[in-house]
Image: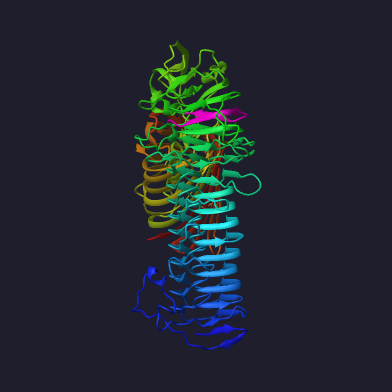
Amino acid sequence: MRFFCFGMLLPFTFVLANEGLQLPLETYITLSPEYQAAPQVGFTHNQNQDLAIVGNHNDFILDYKYYRSNGGALTCKNLLISENIGNVFFEKNVCPNSGGAIYAAQNCTISKNQNYAFTTNLVSDNPTATAGSLLGGALFAINCSITNNLGQGTFVDNLALNKGGALYTETNLSIKDNKGPIIIKQNRALNSDSLGGGIYSGNSLNIEGNSGAIQITSNSSGSGGGIFSTQTLTISSNKKLIEISENSAFANNYGSNFNPGGGGLTTTFCTILNNREGVLFNNNQSQSNGGAIHAKSIIIKENGPVYFLNNTATRGGALLNLSAGAGNGSFILSADNGDIIFNNNTASKHALNPPYRNAIHSTPNMNLQIGARPGYRVLFYDPIEHELPSSFPILFNFETGHTGTVLFSGEHVHQNFTDEMNFFSYLRNTSELRQGVLAVEDGAGLACYKFFQRGGTLLLGQGAVITTAGTIPTPSSTPTTVGSTITLNHIAIDLPSILSFQAQAPKIWIYPTKTGSTYTEDSNPTITISGTLTLRNSNNEDPYDSLDLSHSLEKVPLLYIVDVAAQKINSSQLDLSTLNSGEHYGYQGIWSTYWVETTTITNPTSLLGANTKHKLLYANWSPLGYRPHPERRGEFITNALWQSAYTALAGLHSLSSWDEEKGHAASLQGIGLLVHQKDKNGFKGFRSHMTGYSATTEATSSQSPNFSLGFAQFFSKAKEHESQNSTSSHHYFSGMCIENTLFKEWIRLSVSLAYMFTSEHTHTMYQGLLEGNSQGSFHNHTLAGALSCVFLPQPHGESLQIYPFITALAIRGNLAAFQESGDHAREFSLHRPLTDVSLPVGIRASWKNHHRVPLVWLTEISYRSTLYRQDPELHSKLLISQGTWTTQATPVTYNALGIKVKNTMQVFPKVTLSLDYSADISSSTLSHYLNVASRMRF
């Protein structure tokens, strides 16, 4: 073990830990010279010297050290801990001022090490001490850099009284480009106004580019239970999950310079950017503000999934914007590469027991912007409070590319939590929807002073509420609804949720005025409803794959308007005709809509009954059939019968081996087939390739017909055009061929019969509006036959022979029923098998070379016309909706041109090698066949 100091190599021996001595953290609070008979003084304590701990191959341990001032184990000017292969441990060190283990008067760098750990270090003489800085339970530095470390970094069970339970930096802290994980856990800052239970940074904290997971858990302090960074905190470009969980900010003693909060973290400017595996804030607690984050400004963009779960505070269950300091606060939440989810966060400012669900609480003049990219969502299962006055409108989907969904939902609210605050988001300033989707579902509500739909879609599900609310001109004034207005110009109804059991129609409502326990109509607000009314599902897609639409429906409640006697809701420009306009996939049918209007007497004791004008939109549905989405249509499954037919024909080619010599023979063949089926008539084609082998035996004699028997095994893969759909197939082929001559050998007649069994596995990838994948396994059977007539010239001994031929080919294939699993799973069964009878007619030429190595060249050209065809069709069913349709195969041309070239070489008297290439060319299909064979006669 070596210790580097001032560039000199100084050997020394460390006192290792007494393994038999186990002292809990509380014991160290009273460790000092007057309580310890023989304290072990740290190795060096000089704030004017630089120290380096580098290059240790063995474990480096500093433990049980005490120093009367700063730095229980080490005190120095600049400290470098680098390139240590052995573990570096600072354990159970104590000082009464700052830096329980290390005090660096300027900079501390921890870089390129294997494992390093700071455990159970503390700064304190006794629990009631108030003098001294008492900063940095494990480490104190002006600036600190923890970078490029290979192993795990651990900061556990450290303690300070004032700031930085584990880490304290006067200005900047950088945790960057570390390969191994970092754990900052169970550290504490004890005083009631303490800051940063895990980390305190006096200026900025950067957590960037780390490859390992970062865990900041179970830390506690008065404010900033996990992290307190005075100015900026940046968490960016980390490759693994960042977890900030189980931290606690316990202070509730407000002062002129102390506004505590942030169970997870407190800072002024917080940026969480481009973290691939996402960020988790879970079960953090604050006795004051912001259960997860307390900050003036927050930017969350370009991350994987970001979770705010189970956090709690007095105000702002998950987030609260810090109101102190100059300038206005802003929260920018953008779901770009993963969803942002708020669920089961709670606040208790209204003294509810249990606390009410709450995601965000705003202070005056907050700028809140929320949006999502296509395919992603910001999910508020907890409401937000934007009640105090602000000159900035709330913007939903504020950027041009924000066409995703911002959702408010009461889906996860416990059935016993019936208070309105668990469901309603109070937006008492101006709000705007710019584009994309703003969805309100499952009993959630938006209570708005002013809401303007500049673009996009307002998607309303069962029990959703859009209502008016008063604004608060100054923080101390009474809410007023004068000037309140809501403008809606494109409403969509979440049809599947409306059709669910005991569903209630979404409600657009002028909220009554409450005086004591009395409710009266409020004639100040106005609501304008115009534009188109459409039907969607919760993913903002066509809802017509719902099983409910397979049969007639009556009196479906689509929209409930609750107006006042003065009729302040104008829905005359709402266009209902669009319900039956345009094309869609799924169940087809006709909607018939009608309004039911009632006028009641006001009920001052009822919140809903105070209003007297009620208007309910109903619809009846008459189904007219089913039309599948093109991605679900399934012609690729039907095309599997054509793929098997091409493979069976390749197997037939391997059976015939016309030879003038008599006797017995056996052959082994390697076979390849490439098929390119073009798109046609709106149906997608495919590309398949097959390889395999065949073994055949032959028997020929002058007294009886020639006979051959063959067995083959083929492996193929196919991929559909313009998609990722694919199949993998395993084919088992057997066949026989009988050949004979007629009319004094002027005609050679051959008959071939074959059977093939195919086992297939299909994988369907959905793209575009549909997402997900499905898979299934099935098998099919193929029968193939050929009757060939070759007109032979005479005599046989001519070197060049040209002769015509005609062949009748027949194929029949059927497919066994099967069911997919996964997303958009379907069921397929055979409706019509594939049947094809064709007649190739052509000319064959052969040329023989009787030189040293006998060669035979054979060429063919043929024209094939289809005499009869029954294209295959499948019965198809989408399991989720039970919608059925007929799936056809991609059309195949009835005529084709065939060419063939074959070379046979006699390498030994009884052994021949051959290479056979053929191609079929048509306007729809191009296939290439290759056969390499070795044949031996006996």
- Residue 582 appears in which quarter of the rendering? top right
Quick check: 734 left or right of 78? Answer: left
How many numbered discs? 0
Q: Toward the viewer: 263 or 778?
A: 263
Q: Toward the viewer: 678 or 192?
A: 192
Is 444 included in the stretch rendered in magenta? yes
**Which span of residues is magenta-colored?**
442-460
Please tell me whether residue 716 is drawn above or below residue 207 in the rendered image. above
- Residue 376: where, in percent of width, then height? 53, 41
Say how the picture is coloured.
rainbow
Quick check: 775 left or right of 476? Answer: left
- Residue 606: where, in percent of width, then height? 41, 20
Q: Which residue is outermost to the bottom?
A: 11
Placement of the C terminus among the 4 image quadrants: bottom left
Please tell me whether residue 847 is drawn above or below residue 833 in the rendered image. below
- Residue 775 appears in which quarter of the rendering? top left
Q: Is residue 314 visible?
A: yes
Q: Is residue 178 visible?
A: no
Is 520 included in the stretch rendered in magenta? no
- Residue 253: where, in percent of width, then height? 49, 51
- Residue 641: where, in percent of width, then height? 43, 38
Q: Toward the viewer: 836 or 31?
A: 31
